[in-house]
Image: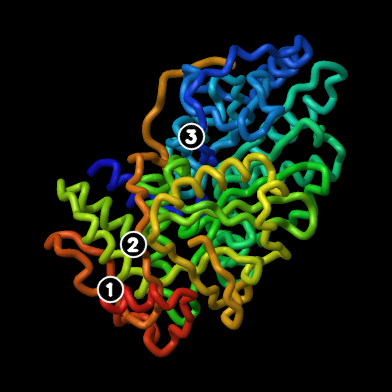
Amino acid sequence: MTGIRQALRASSLGCALCLGLVVPTALASTAVAAPVLSPQTQQTIAELDGDGVFRPAEPDDGLGPDWLSTSFPRADGNTIVVVTPGTDDGTLFPRIQGLRAGRQTLIIDYPEALGPLVSGRSGAVLPIFAPGYDASRDVAVDNNLAVMRAFAQQTDGQPFVVYTGYSQGADALGDAAETAVAGGTIDASNSLILLISDPRSPWGLKAWADDHPVVGTVFELFGATSNGARDPGATGEDLPVTSVIVVGDPVANFQWRAHRPLSSLLVNGAGFIAIHSGLGEENYGNLIDYTEPPTTMRSRDGNTTYVVYQPKHHPLTLVAMILNDAVGLDPSESDIARWDAVNNAFYPLVTPTPSNAAVPVEQATSSTSSLPPLVEQATSAARSRVETTAEPQITETATGGRHRAPETTDPGITPETEAPTEGGRHRLTGVGRHSTDAEPSSDSTEAPTDASSTPDVSTPDADTGNDTPDSEADTETDTSSDSTESESDAA
């Protein structure tokens, strides 16, 4: 119950502004050999550490699934991983376990704050004294730039460096990469950028806010600038960038229907608690368990690949599962399937597609030979799981807003150590219940009703009767007639 209260408090505090990484592959659980870094690289790290760029990392036993070296042939045990955490990031080390595997891991030190609501690691006695979002993020930008510049200036023994950031950390890392490319202070041939849950994704919170000027005023209360979607062209053609998105995470895939504001906020709140904060069974910490292969898109400008994962369950269903678990109830698979049917009818998620992106993107070719090794491995691993079941998966139609396309339907795949810490906004629990399930989608039902046979906890329906009429305005067409039919029965 304590974890749930903390997540609910985090959700109410923040918002999606603070609103990493596991990209799934089925890999062998072996330890990487101890890293052998060149003397020049060791000196570079020592100088950066002396300047306060890094903070201590928790111990790593070097065990576990090492997908990095399998996905990227160059990413051997001598690869350096530079991580920029999210706001008050409590799931940092579980989330990056598959990246570390004994490698040299450097954690960017910055406030991780969202003043006046979250102190993070700023040292502020009270959140009202903590730095605002932009001030916190800019510290991370400067520290990432210092690392990029230092490695680029090495005259010998340059390492291959994987830079990754989560949430606010992804925002900072993306901005740093753009600045470094513009200034020629990053060794693009020896670098890889991994943005996880980036608020500036083409379907993210900041892309949506850029279309709603009033929201910019709200952002200013938290010291944040509404700077829109990230321009993939700003990182050039030579620097590879991968952006990982989970459908339903309001940071990277903000849900909005102008005629259903309360429903949209309800679903975004559920997605923040269950997916972004990591309390639900499906989140960024266990993508390796997802049964559906990711959708892959490419930017028309620059060299960015977008990898989109579809959770098995609707965010409202995930929250219902969390609440049931908190009171000691174990809902059956049929209960969960019914909740999904009702919730998908109540609010079908808008999945990222080229037609609703805020920047020009294209669907990647179906040939995996054209995909980056990371995406190819993740796709083949997920497909191998999907082939074991015959049930359909959810697809949705984009709708509403400047970045949505209601007339076009694209299928959417719905250098020290410290003791481990607890707490933080982004928490990780569970290993997931990921057997494939039919998830019908339609918008013909006004609100979820009788979603659970369990008497004390069911799917939320808090905004029914408060939105402008849902039944008239919800005109989205599901791409699967079978899903619509089964959903009507379930509702």
Front-lying residue, 1 or 434: 434
Asked whether, in this view, residue 416 is left or right of residue 362, the answer is left
The label nearer to you, 1 versus 3, is 1
Q: Callout 1, which amino acid?
A: Pro
Q: Earlier in the sequence, mark 1 or mark 2?
A: 2
Crowd class of label 3 (few under 14; some 14 to 19; many from 20; radius 10 Å): many
* Vertical position of residue 20 compared to residue 488: above or below: above
Front-lying residue, 218 or 49: 49
Instruction: Identify the secondary structure beneath mark 2.
Output: helix
Q: Earlier in the sequence, mark 2 or mark 3?
A: 3
Residue 60 on image: x %, y %: 49, 19
Q: Callout 3, which amino acid?
A: Leu
Q: Callout 2, which amino acid?
A: Leu
The image's mark for residue 316 is: 2
Q: Is residue 334 visible?
A: yes
Q: Which residue bears the numbered disc 1? A: 448
Q: Are marks 1 and 2 in contact (CB under 8 Å)?
A: yes
